[in-house]
Amino acid sequence: MLRRFATVSMLVASLCASGAMLDLTQVFAWARMFGGYARSESVMAAARDTFDPARPCELCQAVSRAREAASSQAPAPRTQGAEKMLLILERPSAFLISRPQEAWPVAAHACPVARASDVPVPPPKSIAA
């Protein structure tokens, strides 16, 4: 249960940090607008009115204000004197084609050792009373 809570918390935090929550809110607003317009208009007219920038709903305006506030609070990118730092440098490995071997090599330990003599058998047990 604790692991599931941690996973959900990380998912919500990443959605909030990346701005995806505003995208989800905008999609919800469009769906609500489309449903409202589709009750009284055709599907094409409802879609046209939904995505008309001259007719935003209150939720669309709130999302726009939130995006503007987020962009104004974001730090300005440094262009002068900024150095690029490479954290990971991965060089592709060389692609080599080799022809397959004709036969598999025989390993020395793959062949069992043959015994030179018979296996010793213990003498039979006598049944003495």
Image (tube, rainbow, N blue to C red):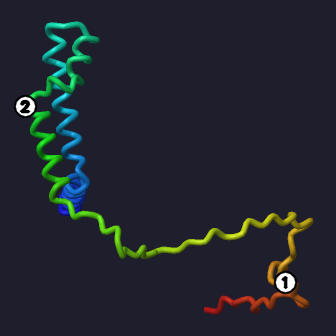
Left/right of residue 28 with respect to residue 79 in the rendered view: left
The label on residue 84 is none
Q: CA gap, disc 1 to disc 2?
A: 81 Å
* Residue that badge 1 annotates: 108
* Residue that badge 2 annotates: 58
Q: Is residue 105 above or below residue 127?
A: above
The spot of residue 78 in percent (x, y) is 31, 68
Q: Residue at x 80, y 83 (%)?
A: 109
The amino acid pointed to by label 2 is: Glu
The spot of residue 65 in percent (x, y) is 11, 43
Q: Residue at x 11, y 28 (%)?
A: 57
The spot of residue 103 in percent (x, y) is 90, 67
Q: Is residue 119 visible?
A: yes
Nearer the observer, 78 or 99: 78
Q: Residue at x 84, y 66 (%)?
A: 98
Q: Earlier in the sequence, mark 1 or mark 2?
A: 2
